[in-house]
Amino acid sequence: MQNKLCWQGAWLRGKGFTVNCPGGHEGCTANLPVHAPLSEYDMAKSIGTELALQNVLIKYATTDGDGRSAAGIEDSLKILHPMCSVERLADPSHLAATQFRHCYNAKFSDEMFPGKTRLDKGKVKKILSQDVKARCSLIMTTCTLFENHCGNTEEMRKCLPKVLESTIRCYDGDCSKSKCRSHSVVCPGGITNNWWNRSMYLASNKVDSLNMNENNKSILSEILKIRISEAALEKNKFQTNTQKCEAINRSLSVSLPKNVNYGRNAMGRLSSTILRSNGGIKNATEQKAKLLGAPLSPKTRYSLRQTTLYRITAIVNKQDIQMQAIAIHPPFALILV
Ligand SMILES: [Zn+2]
Ligand SMILES: [Zn+2]
């Protein structure tokens, strides 16, 4: 863990002693100078070094768009294994968020969206951005294109240009000419059963047409290419994502909130959370109490077990609801999930 805080050093400096952290005095808790940046690159480098020493080589690393973690891992592995290279894969959730932002900030012409005022048009633009994001997720990541070709990326690559073209035409309002049924993957075409009527964003907000000129179409095409293109497919070929990292991040922020500085016991709180995430509340509490020399009473153990059971039941029930939703409305529930 990278730590810049040292209460003891600060106290000594306040008393007039000249001490430098890290390492300038006994019991220093800091391991970084105060002005050093906290970098993902350095963190990935130290993880990479640990793995390289155990002869574990990494070929693919899935990261969010802004970090340089993959480069950090590669640089550390190259010290011991010069031929090793790490390929960075993209996380679909971050890519989807980027696509939404691009679409929402794109400079489409004013006459493209229905509505009388600028506010009305802005609302439709937001709806379109959400719809584009959901539609691309459905095509690329959720299941459809992968299922149709059993995950064969060569086959998928061949049909991507047709999917892109028919998607743009579908947004232009022409489902029959764009051959939605055979190429668009998610729009069955037709008059009552097309994407415009089935989409949870467009249909529920009663958006039924867009007045696109050539310029708007090319902007939309660039936005769709963020996810429907060979480059995007290559970055997402194993369908990997960083959801588990985000979940761990969320559970760590419960015991280590950003607005509180735990200069002395941050490492302890971190280890405690890791123990709880790995073993569950019951096992973690039991283990900690036992090591402290105060084993839990049978009554406390029973109530802890009940808490764990309740949590598991809640998760199972939630999954049941999602499964039922998929069974009733396939395209919409998949977007929701
Ligand atoms: Zn110190
Ligand atoms: Zn269509």
Image (cartoon, helix red, strand yellow):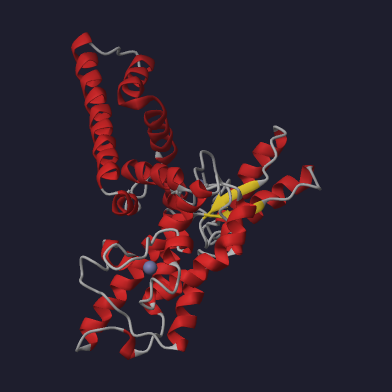
Rendered location of residue 120, percent (x, y): 21, 82
Can residue 153 be seen by looking at this rendering? yes
Rendered location of residue 229, percent (x, y): 56, 65
Q: Nearer the viewer, residue 148 or 128?
A: 148
Rendered location of residue 140, percent (x, y): 48, 56
Outermost residue, top side: 298
Q: Nearer the viewer, residue 91 or 114?
A: 114
Is residue 8 left or right of 111 when viewed as pictured? right
Can residue 263 be seen by looking at this rendering? no
Residue in the picture at 70% in, 32% down: 54
Determine which quarter of the picture holds residue 101.
bottom left
Rendered location of residue 305, percent (x, y): 25, 19
Q: Is residue 23 above or below residue 156?
A: above
Q: Is residue 233 above or below residue 78?
A: below
Determine which quarter of the picture holds residue 36.
bottom right
Q: Nearer the viewer, residue 93 or 152?
A: 152
Outermost residue, right side: 82
Q: Is residue 237 above or below residue 310?
A: below
- The number of callouts visible is 0
Quadrant of ligand 2 in image:
bottom left
Residue in the picture at 31% in, 90% down: 111
Is residue 93 left or right of 307 when viewed as pictured? right
Determine which quarter of the picture holds residue 201.
bottom left
